[in-house]
Image (spheres, rainbow, N blue to C red):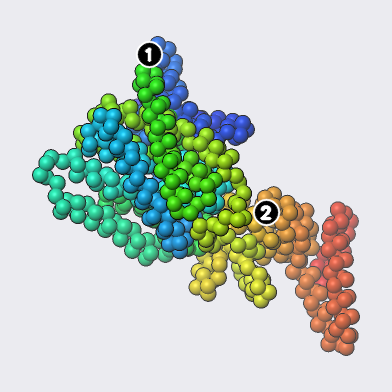
Amino acid sequence: MEGQVEAAAYKDVVLFLATAGIVVPLFRRWRISPILGFLGAGVLLGPYGLGSLADEFGWLSALTIDNPDQVAQLAEFGVVFLLFMIGLELSWERLRRMRRYVFGLGALQVGVCVAALAGAAHLFGAPLEAAIAIGAALALSSTAIVMPVLTEQKRQHAVAGRVTFSVLLFQDLAVAPILVALALFGRRAGEASASDLFVSFATGALGLLILLVFGRLLLRPMLRSVAKAKSEELFVAACLLVVIGAGLVSELTGLSMALGAFIAGLLLAETEYRHEVEVTIEPFKGLLLGLFFVSVGIRLNVPLLVEQPLPIIGAALGLILVNGAVVFGLARLFGLETRRAVESALLLAAGGEFAFVILSEAMGQGLVDRTLGESVLVTVTISMFAIPLLAAWGLKLGGRQVNPAEPPPEPDPAPDAEPRVLIAGYGRVGRLVGEMLRSHDIPWVAAESDPRIVEQARRAGETIFFGDASRAEFLQRCGLSDAPALVVTMDNPDGAEAIVATARGLRPDLTIVARARDARHAKRLYDLGATDAVPETVEASLQLSEALLVEIGVPMGLVIASIHERRDAFRAELNRPEALGGRTRARRQTDGA
């Protein structure tokens, strides 16, 4: 029947989703990184796991991934989305301040590790060009595994975390030149020329220029137009278009998709849509990264590991020792304290996902014998399995706390680093609250769901982000975890209640002051956890009374004292459980006064 759904075509997707539903809750309950669960699931579900028994036990084919190559192709988007999110968390200014570690330590790490590993491969009998390709593949660490581990352990902004990210970033930048060099090595003698190299690099530079120019000119206006449509689905589609579109432009010009997505993230990091985009993309990143880890597990050639266990495990240990020793020595050379250098070395010691890309290209060009290449890929995979364990050792040796005597090697100019009062809603009331906070030199940040208000405030130089403040993820990204207080100024009662309930659930100790429409609404806000709720009708009555009493000659001191007394009595009455019981009619009369 035409158009009939074939269940077998969706089996791999269903298996992955079932794996995610089992692995993540189970491993979090055991307090083990879910990364290990995904890696193990990939081995189990792959052709070398249950797939090797499917011929003997036919029913096992239903639990085996049939198309590992298609899974691996889709899984590459996990790294793309990860680099996009990393770009969003940075800024051009912060990247400029990290340049010493990105282009200094990172460049030295790649160069020294390539030379050391290529020399070792050549000593063990690999031809020179094959040894260089193997060294280049093994010198690159795993951004896709290391960065989530750092985030999970809350170390991404520590000294070792920033240094590790700087090195990983340069490694990602180095992938394109490595692939170009392999393509030139693979050509016949006499065909490669300086003009070929120039054209390859010029194409990559053109791709970067296109991303930067069009990103600067089009990204913000496009997201502003989408935000004005007030369609959540359209905003999700626009975010996915930015990530995938930037990656494809980068890929078409000879660079990696991950690098293009990273640049797009950097361009959006300075905009008012940053946090809303982060919240929108996060679920896609999590799922695709999980798929990436499954694909790494699938690639583990178990029969080859069984045939040559000692050489492969020995090579994996050698890879970890060489990379770790180089990173440690360079980190000390750049002034890192010993424990921080050890921590960075352990995080960067293992191989990474780009080894599969580089070695596949090298084998396709005939530079590396396929049998040797397969053995090296198994070695890389084994080392990647060890990353969570290496990171745990690094955490234990480096310690969570930064040594007060150790000055950080680079300042962290992240815009959200300073605790700030969070204003939810930036209409007339929110603007007045912001002005009062500024007059007392209290830093603040605002969140607003109306793109027109956000645009006007941004033009005025205010720190404001577009997004839905009732979502926990958005509040966290706006700095709720460190905020001294939250002020809810929205005139939408349901929206205000949702924000108060969400914020109180995240921060039981947070001071929450909320705008209420009337006494009944104030009571609901108190019940939801507001520290203070200010009913508009009551405050208007008190201000009218204050003006009247002063005008008719009552001394100002007595008026202010009586107003404060009445306000405190009203708050106390609202906080009583029976406050809205039998006195509802009287309260309504008071509100209407």
Which corner quadrant holds the N terminus?
top left
Say whether residue 510 is left or right of residue 404.
right
| Dot 2 crowding, Cα within 10 Å, few <14, some 14–19, many 20+ | many
What type is the residue that disc 1 sits on?
Asp
Q: Which mark is residue 496?
A: none
Say whether residue 343 is left or right of residue 203.
right
Closer to the camera in the image, 261 or 499: 261
Closer to the camera in the image, 431 or 198: 198
Q: CA distance from mark 1 to mark 2?
A: 55 Å
Closer to the camera in the image, 338 or 500: 338
**Residue at figure coordinates x 31%, y 42% from the top left:** 115
**Residue at figure coordinates x 38%, y 47% from the top left:** 109
Closer to the camera in the image, 80 or 301: 301
Q: Which residue is mark 1?
A: 55
Say whether residue 385 is left or right of residue 484.
left
Callout 1 secondary element: loop
**Residue at figure coordinates x 48%, y 54% from the top left:** 335
Q: Is residue 232 visible?
A: no
Q: Which mark is residue 503?
A: 2
Residue 327, percent from left and from top: 43, 45
Instruction: Tell which circle, 1 or 2, labels the residue nearer the N-terminal end.
Output: 1
Residue 201, percent from left and from top: 24, 54
What type is the residue that disc 2 sits on?
Ala
Residue 574: quarter of image: bottom right
Residue 146, percent from left and from top: 47, 42
**Residue at figure coordinates x 39%, y 34% from the top left:** 319
Residue 130, percent from left and from top: 24, 35
Callout 2 secondary element: helix
